[in-house]
Amino acid sequence: MTVSNVYIHAFKTLPDGSVTYCEEGDAPTGWAVYARIDLDDGEFNVIDETEHETFDDALTQGFALSHMHQVTLEHY
Protein backbone atom coordinates (compact mmCIF):
# COMPACT_ATOMS: atom_id res chain seq x y z
CA MET A 1 0.00 0.00 0.00
CA THR A 2 1.18 3.48 -0.86
CA VAL A 3 0.50 6.75 0.96
CA SER A 4 -1.56 9.06 -1.27
CA ASN A 5 -1.40 12.31 0.74
CA VAL A 6 -0.57 13.79 4.12
CA TYR A 7 -3.20 15.96 5.80
CA ILE A 8 -3.37 18.57 8.54
CA HIS A 9 -6.87 18.81 9.93
CA ALA A 10 -8.13 21.05 12.73
CA PHE A 11 -10.13 19.40 15.51
CA LYS A 12 -12.09 20.61 18.50
CA THR A 13 -12.92 19.09 21.86
CA LEU A 14 -16.63 19.14 22.66
CA PRO A 15 -18.05 19.86 26.13
CA ASP A 16 -18.59 16.13 26.76
CA GLY A 17 -14.88 15.48 26.10
CA SER A 18 -15.31 13.88 22.69
CA VAL A 19 -13.30 15.15 19.72
CA THR A 20 -14.49 15.99 16.22
CA TYR A 21 -12.95 17.60 13.15
CA CYS A 22 -13.65 21.32 12.80
CA GLU A 23 -16.03 22.73 10.26
CA GLU A 24 -15.39 26.08 8.60
CA GLY A 25 -15.49 28.85 11.22
CA ASP A 26 -14.94 26.57 14.25
CA ALA A 27 -12.15 27.45 16.66
CA PRO A 28 -9.75 24.49 16.82
CA THR A 29 -8.40 23.08 20.07
CA GLY A 30 -5.69 21.19 18.19
CA TRP A 31 -4.41 19.86 14.89
CA ALA A 32 -4.19 16.29 13.60
CA VAL A 33 -1.52 15.24 11.11
CA TYR A 34 -1.93 11.94 9.29
CA ALA A 35 -0.96 10.02 6.18
CA ARG A 36 -3.73 8.47 4.12
CA ILE A 37 -3.62 5.23 2.16
CA ASP A 38 -6.40 4.98 -0.44
CA LEU A 39 -7.90 1.49 -0.80
CA ASP A 40 -9.29 -0.13 -3.93
CA ASP A 41 -12.89 0.03 -2.65
CA GLY A 42 -12.83 3.83 -2.29
CA GLU A 43 -12.20 3.70 1.46
CA PHE A 44 -8.92 4.68 3.09
CA ASN A 45 -6.70 3.86 6.05
CA VAL A 46 -5.01 6.45 8.25
CA ILE A 47 -1.44 5.90 9.45
CA ASP A 48 1.17 7.95 11.31
CA GLU A 49 -1.50 10.06 13.06
CA THR A 50 -0.26 12.62 15.58
CA GLU A 51 -1.98 15.46 17.44
CA HIS A 52 -0.52 18.93 18.00
CA GLU A 53 -1.56 21.91 20.10
CA THR A 54 -0.36 24.50 17.59
CA PHE A 55 -0.65 24.81 13.84
CA ASP A 56 3.09 25.53 13.57
CA ASP A 57 3.95 22.21 15.26
CA ALA A 58 1.46 20.40 13.01
CA LEU A 59 2.90 22.08 9.92
CA THR A 60 6.43 21.02 10.86
CA GLN A 61 5.30 17.41 11.33
CA GLY A 62 3.19 17.54 8.16
CA PHE A 63 6.10 18.74 6.04
CA ALA A 64 8.36 16.01 7.46
CA LEU A 65 5.77 13.29 6.86
CA SER A 66 4.96 14.46 3.33
CA HIS A 67 8.67 14.60 2.52
CA MET A 68 9.22 11.10 3.94
CA HIS A 69 6.36 9.65 1.85
CA GLN A 70 7.09 11.96 -1.13
CA VAL A 71 3.48 13.15 -1.38
CA THR A 72 1.68 16.48 -1.11
CA LEU A 73 0.62 18.05 2.17
CA GLU A 74 -3.00 19.20 2.34
CA HIS A 75 -4.68 21.35 4.97
CA TYR A 76 -8.30 21.30 6.12
Image (cartoon, helix red, strand yellow):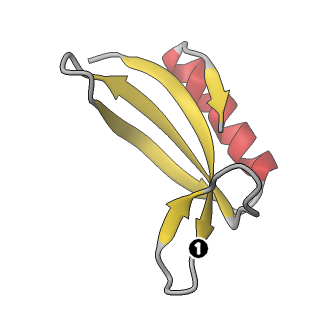
Q: Answer with left or right where residue 44 lies relative to residue 21.
A: left
Q: How would you rate the neighbour count of disc 1 (Cα within 10 Å): few for under 14, some for 14-19, many for 20 or more? A: some
The structure residue drawn at horizontal position 18% and vertical position 21%, both measured from the top left corner, is: 41
The extreme left residue here reads 41
Rendered-image quadrant of the N terminus: top left
Residue 56 vertical placement versus 37 (above, below): below
Q: Return the residue found at the far bottom.
A: 16
Residue at (62, 56) in percent of width and height:
22
29, 52: nearer the viewer: 29
Residue 44 at what x, y percent from top left?
Answer: 30, 30
- The location of residue 12, given as percent across then percent down, is 62, 66
Residue drawn at point x = 54 percent, y = 13 percent: 70
Q: Is residue 65 left or right of residue 30?
A: left
Pick the front one: 30 or 27: 27
Q: In the image, what residue type sits under mark 1? A: Thr
Q: Quadrant of residue 76?
A: top right
Q: Is residue 62 above or below residue 15?
A: above
Tell which of 32 and 40 is nearer to you.
40
**Left of 44 or right of it: where is 6?**
right
Secondary structure of the residue carrying numbered label 1:
strand
In the image, residue 48 above or below residue 51? above
Exactly how many numbered labels are in the figure? 1
**Which residue is the site of mark 1?**
13
Instruction: From the top left corner, tell me how far across and down residue 54 is, in percent.
Output: 77, 57
Q: Quadrant of residue 72?
A: top right
Q: Residue at x 52, y 51 (%)?
A: 50
